[in-house]
Amino acid sequence: MTNNVFLFESLPNEIIIELFKYLEARDLIQAFYHLNSRFNCLIRSLTHLIYSTNKNDNCILSYSFIYTLVINTKIEDKLSCFPNIHRIVLDYVTDDLITQFNSQALPYLEYLSVSHKVSPFYMPDLRGKIFSNEFPNLKSCYISRMKPAYTLREWTRSPSLRFLKLNDIDASIYTSILLACPNLYYLKFRLPERSKIESNIMLHSNLKRLLINLNHDEWPWDDNVLDGYLACVPNLEKLRINRSVSVDSNVMNFFQHYDWLLPTISKRLLMSQFLRRITSLPIQSIRSFHSFDEVTPAKYISTRLKNGVGSRYVCQLQRLTIQVCKEFRTSFGTRDWIANDLIKFAREHPYVVVYVQPRRHRAPNLVGEYLAGDRQWIPLSNCDREKVNWWIHSLLTQKGDPQWRLLKQMHTDSPSVQGIWTPFTNKPIDRITRTYPDKDLTEMEYPQITATQQIQELFEQQKLNKTS
């Protein structure tokens, strides 16, 4: 009998990296760094190492590998001691930190979060650095305070910024941000007051995602406030507006005839092809809403749809990725499907490659990749086993195109209940329930009497009448 000795180094890199995520940066560096060249390369590639100033972690050896820096107390060391910083969370700012906060000390900064705990005294200087291209690699940013914005004139441009989340702003800050961020793709902000954009419409062609939280929703709603904001973003693809209102009988009656910003959207967003409008209301008693078919993308069928007709069927779904968490309750249905139905699905559909991707403390998702290069993404949060199975088979039977309303190829000004003519029009209904081949239907149907025979019969009858 041989004894199998398990070695930590025999594990693949993917598993070792997952195990490293459970260790603090100080313990990880002290235990594995300089062990061999393989572990050195793995540690340099890690993107989850976090250093927080309130933990009194003075392991200087780990500073060069820190990826995320959380500053919530006074930092004793210089920012230049962290050469690999890509993400910063600011909860505490001092004069010395503002002086060090530049591209020379943070050349690789990609994400910056400025918390509401930061004193308002330092906010203008921070905003000036963010919107003046102080950090050429900055892609995503969250700023808790945008008021007072008395340094707007000092902003130049920040072409690298793509994702921006803000709290309270007004019309002037909105237009200044669009001017300072020409490549902005996603913008989220809160509008605490009815601040309209009367003039100075700043067109921004690259903004595709816009999320607005309206906190000034005194009843009745004033939808004209949003007209100027939407006029600045003609190429918008996704729009989300969050509103809240106290429900009473008058509000319920108003919702039955509310147009849900349809005139504004139709006027300002004519070029949007994949517009998705979601209005969030804390209302559980509303069961019927206005129809949104007018703004749903529509087209005619442009493909022949002959896959499997007269030839071999080719499944369009090629790869299925299931992203799941091993602990969170939101993934209980996904985990149940993986444990009971995954092997059966793989055997029945060998042409679909299935990947299971564990993700810690994140919601489960379903990603389908198709033969034509399209991708479909389905969230599976809190879905049970049957619902997960339904979504998987739904992706299996699709061909990957975006969801469209298919228009009919024919049109008539006087539509009929009967519909267009088909070979089965005016046929007996019992033919549907018959079992084929049917002997009665295979026999030739002859008319009881032809027109010639009718004339001959009439002639013979006239002869008889004359003789009588």
Image (cartoon, helix red, strand yellow):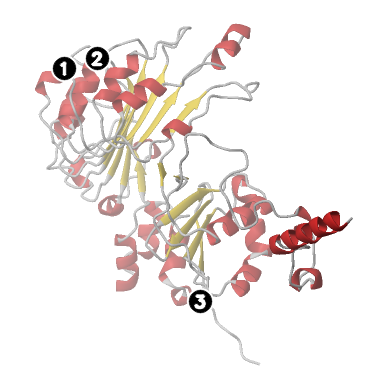
Q: Earlier in the sequence, mark 3 or mark 2?
A: 2
What amino acid type should be assigned to the residue bearing mark 1?
Asn
User: Quick one: which residue is furthest to the front in this view?
Assistant: 467
User: Quick one: which residue is furthest to the bottom in this view?
Assistant: 1
Task: Say the numbered circle drawn on residue 109.
Answer: none
Element type where label 2 sits in the image: loop
Report, in whole angstroms, how far the alpha carbon at label 1 lies from the one at label 2. 7 Å
Decide if residue 96 is in sight here: no
Q: Residue at x 54, y 61 (%)?
A: 396
| Figure quadrant of residue 284 | top right
Across and down, in percent, residue 256 comes to 57, 17
Report, in whole angstroms, how far the alpha carbon at label 1 lies from the one at label 3. 60 Å
Q: Mark 1 sits on what residue? A: 200
Residues at marks 1 and 3 touching, judged by CB atoms closer than 8 Å = no
Task: Please state which of residues 450 and 233 is positioned toward the viewer in this rendering.
Answer: 450
What amino acid type should be assigned to the residue bearing mark 2?
Ile
Task: Say the numbered circle drawn on residue 311.
Answer: 3
Element type where label 3 sits in the image: loop
